[in-house]
Amino acid sequence: MSTISVVIPAHNDAVMLAACLRALSVQTRVPDEVLVVDNASTDETASVCRAAGVRRVYEPEVGVAAATFRGLDEAGGNWLARLDADSVPPPDWLERLETDLESCGEDTAVTGPGEFYGSGPVIKWLAETLYIGGYRWSMTLLMGHPPLFGSNFGLHRSMWKRLSGRVHRGDPRVHDDLDLSYQLRPGMGVCWDPGLRVGVSARPFNTWRGLGRRVAMAYTTFRIDFAQEPPCRRRRERKRSFRQRNRTGAGDHA
């Protein structure tokens, strides 16, 4: 049987992490491993992990990219699922994710949207419609496939192994999900399941500073990724792979 590890990077988010772990404890499909990457936290993150009985890995290099990619390296499951510390998955989240992953295959990651909590209706609408909707539309146009949403995605271990040497771990200003999305190789794709939803805190959108920080991180991520592989060249390689796979009848998931 397939095994699933859930990876959760956490930096000084003990209260929200506890809520996330409680939600994971009542999943209809029990995770085989829950791995929290403690990203140099100075709060009660370690105590929360001990109380929940989950595995904790300490990552001293601060940054969501360093923490996420360390967790994907360390996780032992065949399938690797990803949540944020402020994610609150519904009880059937992991069951639905596993079904999606197995139906899509080992070369296709699966992701879905977030339902934002902790804000008024206007902020919630803006976050879900413009931020998530705009992110999905614009990144699909740029990359030729949907982007991964860091609070809610999964992929096969073999897929991660092929990408682990390409991602950028050392810069705290890099968005891990955007970087990983851009690194997908020809023949790899992303399945966007609109029904695969998790609760996500709306706190980044409550201030202009929080929103500006996310935009700045996206700019930094693109600057680094584009220098590594220009977007036009990337699209050409994916189209070439798509044509070759069509000629052999294999198809392409992008």
Image: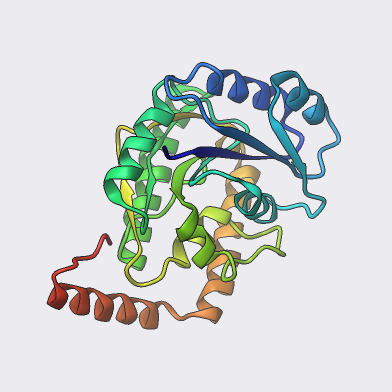
Q: Quadrant of residue 173?
A: bottom right
Colouring scheme applied when the structure was drawn: rainbow
Q: Quadrant of the N terminus?
A: top left
Would you say residue 83 is visible in this rendering?
no
Residue that appears at 65% across and 25% down: 16
- From what the image shows, is residue 148 above or below residue 4? below
Task: Residue at the far right: name it.
Answer: 42
Across and down, in percent, residue 230 comes to 45, 81
In this image, 192 relative to 65: left or right? left
Q: Residue at x 78, y 30 (%)?
A: 45
Question: Does 140 sit above or below residue 240?
Answer: above
Q: Within the image, what quadrant is residue 137 found in?
A: bottom left
Left or right position of 248 against 5: left
The location of residue 12, given as percent across then percent down, is: 77, 35
Where residue 20 appears, as percent x and y from the top left, is: 59, 25
Q: Quadrant of the C terminus?
A: bottom left
**Residue 69 position (above or below residue 17):** below
Residue at horizontal 51 percent and vertical 46 percent from the top:
150
Residue 21 seen from this side? yes
* Residue 113 vs residue 251, the one in the foreground: 251
Left or right of 15 in this view: 121:
left
Residue 167, x across and y down, in percent:
58, 66
Identify which residue is drawn at 69% across, 56% down.
66
How many labels sit on residues? 0
Q: Which of 19/188 is in front?
A: 188
Q: Is residue 16 above or below residue 240?
A: above
Q: Residue furthest front?
A: 1
